Image: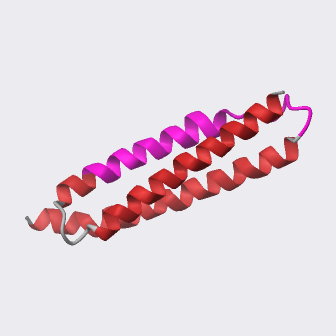
Amino acid sequence: ENSLIALQNLQQYEKDLIEIETKIIHIEININISNYSYLLNQLAQLNGDLDKIQFEKIDSIITANLLTGKYRIKKIRKHLNSKCEIIRQKILDIHTLLIPTVSLK
């Protein structure tokens, strides 16, 4: 059924977001010992990955044609979109922190 497929897809997208969060934590841990330009490139890649997950995957889940689980799937979609915005802000915060450092080198 379409509802089950949508739910499984959303569960996978949540795992994808957790993977991005893990990579961001790794960047934060290495912020004082790594090459800042490299970290900025990593952040740009993560931001691109995040955009793809949110705009091409999460937003592609259409609930109008679902017969069951519509409310639950809408709620999960909304949660994942909120999570994307939190992650995007974290990426921006780290980027803002790194930019002056790169400019000084």
Q: Is residue 7 left or right of residue 20?
A: right
The picture quadrant where one finds residue 22 is: bottom left
The picture quadrant where one finds residue 48 is: top left
Q: Is residue 19 above or below residue 52?
A: below
Residue 43 on the magenta span:
yes
Residue at point 47%, 62% (across, down): 89
Number of on-image labels: 0
Locate the N terminus by quadrant. Answer: top right
Q: Is residue 62 visible?
A: no
Which percent across, then down, holds residue 77? 71, 47
Q: Is residue 92 left or right of residue 74?
A: left
Q: How is the image coloured?
A: secondary structure
Q: Is residue 93 visible?
A: yes
Residue 65 on the magenta span:
yes
Q: Is residue 3 left or right of residue 81?
A: right
Q: Is residue 43 above or below residue 49?
A: below
The picture quadrant where one finds residue 68 is: top right
Which percent across, then down, holds residue 92? 40, 61
Residue at point 46%, 52% (across, down): 20
Residue at point 86%, 47% (across, down): 71
Query: Which stretch appears magenta?
Result: 41-68
What secondary structure prevails in the magenta region? helix
Q: Is residue 102 above or below residue 70?
A: below
Which percent across, then down, holds residue 101? 17, 68
Of 88 and 28, the residue lying toward us: 28
Of 23 and 88, the residue lying toward us: 23
Which percent across, then down, holds residue 61? 70, 35
